[in-house]
Image: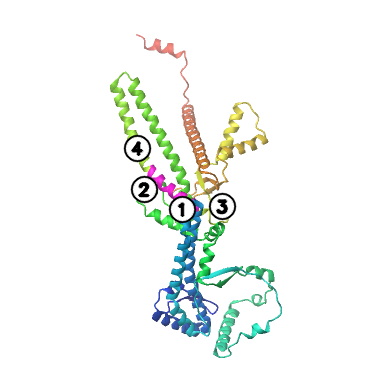
Amino acid sequence: MKNTLITHATSQEIVVDGKAMLSLSVAKFAEQVTLAVDEMATVYGHTTNRVIGSLSGAMRRELNRYIYKADGAVSASMSAALMNKEAGKVKELSKRVQAVADWAEELFDNYKPHADILAGLSSFEVEFHPFQRQVARTFEVNNELDAEEHDEYTFDDSEDYMDDMASLWLEEQSLIAEMSQAELRTQKVNVTQAMDSEPQFETHNITKEEWVEDRVHRKPDEWYEASRFSAWDAIAHVMEEGKKSPHYPLVVETIGDMPEKKLGYATKVMRKAIDMELRIDYLESRKVYIQDQIHKMDNTSEELTIAAMSNSFREDEIDELDMNLRDARKVYNFLAHQAAQFEQWLSLVQLDTPHRVYSSYVAFDPVEFMVNQMVKKAGYQGERVSPRALTQFQKDAYKMLGNPTTIESFKLEDGDNAGLELWGIHFTSGAHDELKDAARSISKVRAIKNRHDELGARAEKLDKIVKSAAMRNKKPTSPFELEAITKKFLF
């Protein structure tokens, strides 16, 4: 029979699948534990206590993971209620915490027979406790042994000791075969570094009532701190709920495929929500403009037939705009709802670098382009551009772009546009209206660049035409040839 609990093992380590342990019945669990002990002792030389310790540790961690997840969900909900000032949810705190405590107690009771099996095969007590408290660890150096405390521990000189020796011998043989002489030398240990690398908290078992009291009397800052990790679960929940929405296919069709990672998904939703808001503003202003043109044609045209023909095209455009507006509003409502939740949860997590609340991408260096335009304008006005003025131009360019946090370039690596260089304009802070104004400014700069590119393409085309005419050695017709034409063809 194949052992399903141990996923990887060597003479130095044992890796256990804790999730698989929780899925086994008591009878199946006893069978698999016995098989694991036999295999680890026979193949790798591990002691029974070592194997049982690894199994119990993995099972305890997996059970605690369920408790942390439930506790984190309550912490996240409480943090959101405090941020949104939802008094009704805050009043339910005691009831929610008590419900989690009752559920945790029942969960651990279900696995007490599993713990009894582990304890029966080992020489130490195995107990899974659902309620724990973390206490800051203090380090004290004491070189004197406490004789009374030391006497409480007894050493077993029976077969476990011989098993330990066998395991140690196997480990030494494996290490000697793989390590060089330099690696076998004793390494010096820095006591301060060793202390710093140790866990800074100690975990103590507490009663169910104490566990509940710890959470009921938390301060807001403590709730926010407890939500740092559960906030990512909340973000994942928002993502999954969004994918179930009937409007999600339209969202993907409009803004493209969504990233799989939580942070990438959230930042794209927040960015596209602002872009879609600007899109709606543009469509609405375009609709108003066309409607004005229809009214002007109806009131000023002397020919009703001409007015009717012209306005029929404009009315078709109005219908198309209405359809685009309807879809754009659906997408915006979806994105705005999710963006508000992501902004809330991302304010709780801790990242090495601040997350981006808005980003825009262009296919040119925006600062360089705008500085060049300022230099041209100064040249037209006959002004001298000094190094100091050039520095001021760069500051003005950043200001005109909304003072972004960073502007960085990168190249696309995949897809049809692989190798294309883009510039990302990123903001890590700012109110909604400020970000919207910055997005509008960036779109204007992008439009100006497109206009310049179009004019440049026209100038290049005209230059080619002129050069082509010069190659054929053609000259412009002189005024004197007009008389010659008259004399030649007059009869």
Answer with mark 2 or mark 3, whichever residue precedes in sequence: 2
Give the residue number, with chain letter if any, for mark 3. Answer: 354
**Residue 322 - label:** 4
Disc 2 crowd rating (10 Å Cα; few below 14, some 14-19, many 20+) is some
Compute the Cα span from label 2 to label 4: 16 Å
Position of the N terminus, as image quadrant, is bottom left
Residue 176: percent from left, percent from top? 60, 80
Disc 1 or 3, which lies upstream in sequence?
Answer: 1
Measured in 3D between alpha carbons, the distance from the residue under mark 3 to the one under mark 4, in whole angstroms, is 39 Å
**Could you give the CA–CA distance between mark 2 and mark 3, rounded to whole angstroms?**
30 Å
Residue 64 location, x and y as percent? 49, 70
**Label 1's element?**
helix
Image quarter hosting the C terminus: top left
| Residue 248 located within the stretch drawn in magenta | no
Q: Residue at x 59, y 33 (%)?
A: 374
Report the Cα–Cα distance between label 1 and label 4: 29 Å
Mark 2 — residue?
A: 250
Q: Position of residue 223 (x, y in %)?
A: 53, 59
Any part of residue 413 in sight: no
Comes first in the chain, label 2 or label 1: 2
Q: Amino acid at mark 2?
A: Leu
Q: Is residue 421 left or right of residue 316?
A: right
> How many numbered badges does the structure rendering display?
4
Determine whether label 1 and label 3 are within 8 Å by CB.
Answer: no
- The answer for how far apart the CA atoms under marks 1 and 3 are is 16 Å
Q: Which residue sits furthest top? A: 491
Residue ID for mark 1? 265
**Amino acid marked by disc 4:** Asp
